[in-house]
Amino acid sequence: MGEQWGFYFDSDKCIGCHACSVSCKQRHGRDPEQDEWRTVKNVTTGEFPDVSSLPISMSCMHCSDAPCEKVCPCNSIQKREEDGIVVVDRDSCIGCHYCGWACPYGAPTYDDGGIMSKCNLCIGEGPGGGYGMPPREEQEDGGAQPACVDNCVGGAIEAGPVSELKEKASTKAVEQFEQEPANVIVEANREDTNAFPYEA
Amino acid sequence: MTSFGLWWGGVGHWDVFVAIYLFLGGISGGAFLVASIAEWFGERSDHEGYDFITRWGWTLSFGTIVVGSWTLLAHLSGPFLRAFMFPVKFTNWTSWMAIGTWVVVTFSLVVMARMIWATFGAEAAEDPSGLPRHVVDRLGNNLLVDWGIDLLDWGADRTRPTGLLRRLVQVGGVALAVMLVVYTALLLSAVSWMVPLWNETLLPPLFVASGFSAGIAMVVAVTYWQNDLDSHLVHRFGLLDDAVIVAEALVLAALLYTLTTGGYGAARTLDGLTSGTGLLLLVGMISAGLLLPLVISAAQQLLGSESALASKRVTTAKFGLVITGSFLLRLLLIFTAVQQPIIVT
């Protein structure tokens, strides 16, 4: 198995500008009216009057043990051995929406034709663009920088081999990452931080 | 003060067609079980009522699984014809959808064979319970294909199993019917770690009870009206239905209890079930599917067979309520299901 790729996200650096989701839509020709493959939300924490709002940017997490892959009846969803990216073979998808129920992150989207598409970590462009593509390469080796990473104004999102992302992250974020199924390292430098991204 | 926020994902990934499919799949398996029970008693009794129930059981089981399969196809949002490639495409054996499709196909073939063996051949019944033969006869006359019925009669008599093979078909059919109903539950509960309402322990027995209960109701009600079934048999099957309804009520109560201790997703599900449409569905399901049928049965027991409450119409209405409750249960499970949130600190 090759080096697994994933995302790194630091909410302290995210200003909620939606540049990531807009650039994602632009690169992949998605619906300009709504966030799809990458979504940005302001998540409210606390209770009045002690309330704060935290911008979170999220897409397919390319889970290490992808539940969408397990439930897909047609094997249309595949977690690639070579780089861990979860891709969709849209030619065999029947649009049963089973992956929508199984995904903890709401990543699958369904277009007008009813076929599923989602983030492919920019190994290809457009829906289904990642399927059948060669292994992911780093930018210096000719690989395309993911649009969300390329356009993030605060440097809140990064993508790359997990081992490299771990070197950049705090110990706490790495510890959290080891406990989660998602291939995303979330910087967790706040107090009382222990539950992101998902509590099963 | 809470130190986290909740990010709720999308809801309603499935539409009413899935609820209809789950309902018809359950009723088809239930009708098959009723037919099997009636067949078993019919072999040990001279009462022709068992034969009526058996034939209607196979026929209704076949009809509901055929319609159910089409509603399943109707919910797919992808290219329609792609679904017909399932023998080639459905190869992921970790997916209950792939496994279940083969269960549905195998079950459909078995129930079709059992229906043909029971309603065609030299000794075919002329009464209404032989409906498939009457339909083929009518179609053949209209389409000027009168050899179709002869072919089916000939085929039924030559392929009808006997002896040990007949027993194997009987037992295998019952196993498939149970698998069909259980699979419709496992299809949902396979993602129970994301959807608290789809409890992996409780959903299979709930679906079996609901499907069996509705199967009894549909088969006995149709036989009651079409073949003027002996009210003694109706009463016996009615009591069996009551017992299954009590079991269903207990499992449903346990399922609702799990929502009180299941975290944020469960709490939100419970909120949905206690307000708006969710509350209507829950109250409707409990009233129509559980309480009213049991109240009617209890009243019939207390007041005796001569009372107005023991009339054919009231008994049929009771069975109708059971079937309605079974459908409302599927609607409830599809439309009030909530996924666990992402928790953001």
Image (cartoon, rainbow, N blue to C red):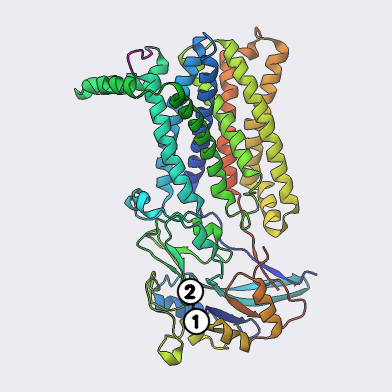
Residue tagged by mark 2? A85
How far across and down, in percent of the image, does residue A6 sit? Answer: 54, 78
How far across and down, in percent of the image, does residue A176 sit? Answer: 68, 76
Residue pictured at 51% horizontal, 34% vertical: B177
**Disc 2 residue type (three-letter):** Ile
Can residue B73 be seen from the camera position used here?
yes
Q: Nearer the viewer, residue B170 or B135?
A: B170
Of badges 2 and 1, nearer the viewer stands 2
Helix, strand or loop under label 2: loop
Can residue A156 be seen from the camera position used here?
no
Quarter of the figure that contains the N terminus of chain B: bottom right
How far across and down, in percent of the image, does residue B333 sit? Answer: 59, 45
Q: Is residue A1 above or below residue B335?
A: below
Residue pictured at 39% horizontal, 77% vertical: A124
Magenta range is: B121-125
Q: Quadrant of residue B233?
A: top right
Number of other residues with Cα within 10 Å of mark 2, as a class: few under 14, some 14 to 19, many 20 or more: many
Marks 2,1: beta carbons within 8 A: no
Helix, strand or loop under label 1: helix
**Disc 1 residue type (three-letter):** Cys
What chain does badge 2 belong to? A
Q: Is residue A143 above or below residue A114?
A: below
